[in-house]
Image: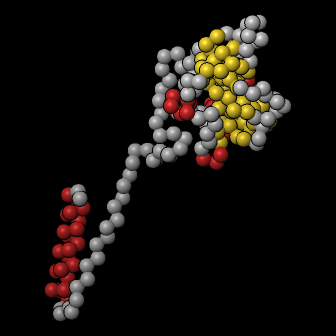
Amino acid sequence: MTSIYRTILTAVITVGLAAPAFAGSVDKVIITIDKTVEQTTDSPRPSKRPGKAVQAPSGDMDNHFIRTDEYFTSLKPLKGGASADVQIAKMVTPASDASKGEAQFMDSYKGAEFWTRNFWKTRPATQDDLKIGTTVIYWGRYAKNHVYFAPRNEKEARNASWRLAKITDTSDLFKGEVTVAGNKRVAVDAIRVME
């Protein structure tokens, strides 16, 4: 308790106890002390979402914590406009005629090796990339109001799946969001495009 509060409390108690002496005989003295304490902070309390730890990208990572030598891959071919899971992987063996156009990759999360012809080099999207019909990749977690956001640290980028889908609506660009296939809203800063 700060000294100013002690002083005020002492004054209130003293006046409360002294008042009956001036008022005559009193059967009972009631003293009420307000225990309300106001607390202010320098900034609003941070939300538990979208992530607890915010990390700055280091080395050759971009703002989504993807390294320059990493690809997004899919084991299954993409069909139609539906969304699909994709994963971060490093190329072990490049595609060639001998491998029928497939490249060998190592999954960055589990370290499993696999062959696929479905792989893409990507980069963070710019405003000019955000057009209806553009195929994009976004991180597979969402925050408040079901808007998918960018990973906040390298662990999040590696430990949750990413999604590949087409942009279907750009009318909320003024809010920093687009809608992709499956009626999912994605924050603009969470979107990647193929190089």
Q: How is the image coloured?
A: secondary structure
Relative to 27, does residue 19 appear above or below in the rendering?
above
Q: Tell me which corner region of the image, top left, top right, bottom left or bottom right, holds residue 186.
A: top right
Instruction: Locate residue 170, reporting x and y percent.
Output: 77, 35
Q: Tell me which corner region of the image, top left, top right, bottom left or bottom right, holds residue 115.
A: top right
Residue under the point 70% across and 26% down: 74
Instruction: Locate residue 143, reporting x and y percent.
Output: 60, 44
Q: Residue furthest right?
A: 80
Residue under the point 50% across and 31% down: 155
Viewer-proximal residue among 102 and 125: 102
Residue under the point 62% across and 14% down: 91
Say whether residue 184 is visible: yes
Q: Tell me which corner region of the image, top left, top right, bottom left or bottom right, holds residue 65.
A: top right
Which quadrant, please, contains the N terminus? bottom left
Instruction: Locate residue 68, reporting x and y percent.
Output: 58, 15
Say whether residue 123 is visible: no
Instruction: Locate residue 190, reporting x and y percent.
Output: 63, 31
Viewer-proximal residue among 1 and 10: 1
Which quadrant, please, contains the C terminus? top right
Residue under the point 34% across and 65% down: 36
Relative to 95, does residue 1 appear above or below in the rendering?
below
Q: Residue furthest top?
A: 97
